[in-house]
Image (cartoon, grey):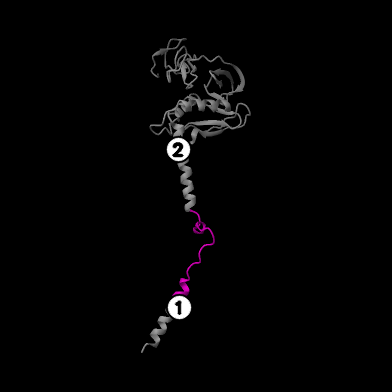
Amino acid sequence: MNARTLNCYSCGAAASSDSPKCDHCGARLATVWCPSCFGMMFTGSKFCPHCGTAAIEWEATPSKLPCPTCKQAMLSGKLGNFPLHECTKCFGLWVDIATLEHVWRDAEQHSLPPSQPQLNTGMNPPGGIPRVKYLPCPRCRQLMNRKNFAQRSGIIVDVCAEHGTWFDANELHHIVQFIRNGGLTMAREFENEDLERARRMAVLRQPERSIWSGNPPPAPDFGGSLLAALFRIAAAILTRK
């Protein structure tokens, strides 16, 4: 629910049900409490406004891992069966590789057959594409790779191949929705089509001799037979009376 029908518990100002902070006093209003879709929920909500799952309060403790964006220490906790790290300033999430695989499997189990293309979801904020910035992995401090999730989702995440993935605020929620809407299945189908198209092009580009099991058949000697025929015609004309 995006309508501003709720109020900040601190100052009483109107606020959106999924707004992380109050626009007036800066008090934190929402947190990632949904153990199913990882959507942000208004503090005190009993059920997720995005998927209806019962809320689970995330009791987090300070962590030594720094936020790749804000550089401040993140919070560490377990949301249901999923251990996560969260930055309380930018609300980004750090998820390790094993947990991420668990998240993908769980989302696919609840996915529906795609009824329409779920590609290029338009995750870029208003005002155009932001400037590209490479972020360091919280664990190894090496710069992470920027990848378009499933190559076609339009959601760009920061990936460390050895340790995990960094999601900006709400990106993990949008990816789970992408998978549940059949986007991952459709992306695989597109990938298979691309591979088949590449295979066909490779076959068409092969030399003609590759279709023969042995040596190619000798080419006919069109030049020699044509020259002999011309000589015969010339001789006939010269001996004609």
Q: Secondary structure at mark 2?
A: helix
Pointers 2 and 1 in contact (CB under 8 A)?
Answer: no
Vertical relation: 239 (above or below) 102: below
Q: Position of residue 115 (x, y in %)?
A: 38, 31
Cα–Cα gap, marks 2 and 1: 60 Å
Number of residues whose C-alpha sits closer than 10 Å to that of mark 1, classed few (under 14), some (14–19) or many (20 or more): few
Vertical relation: 218 (above or below) 137: below
Number of residues whose C-alpha sits closer than 10 Å to that of mark 2, classed few (under 14), some (14–19) or many (20 or more): few
Residue 161 included in the magenta stretch of the image: no
Quadrant for the C terminus, please: bottom left
Earlier sequence position, callout 2 versus callout 1: 2
Q: Secondary structure at mark 1?
A: helix
The magenta segment: 205-227
Observer-nearest of 209 and 29? 209
Farthest left residue in view:
241
Farthest bottom residue in view:
241
Residue 219 included in the magenta stretch of the image: yes
Residue in the picture at 58% in, 27% down: 98
- Residue for badge 1: 228
Query: Can residue 157 be seen here?
Result: yes
Quadrant for the N terminus, please: top left
Observer-nearest of 123 and 76? 76
Residue in the picture at 47% in, 19% down: 40
Q: Locate residue 235: give its quadrant.
A: bottom left
Vertical relation: 198 (above or below) 212: above
Tell me which amino acid carries mark 1.
Ala
Query: Can residue 153 be seen here?
Result: no
Q: Position of residue 90 (x, y in %)?
A: 52, 22
Q: Position of residue 20 (x, y in %)?
A: 48, 18
- Residue for badge 2: 189
Image mark for residue 61:
none
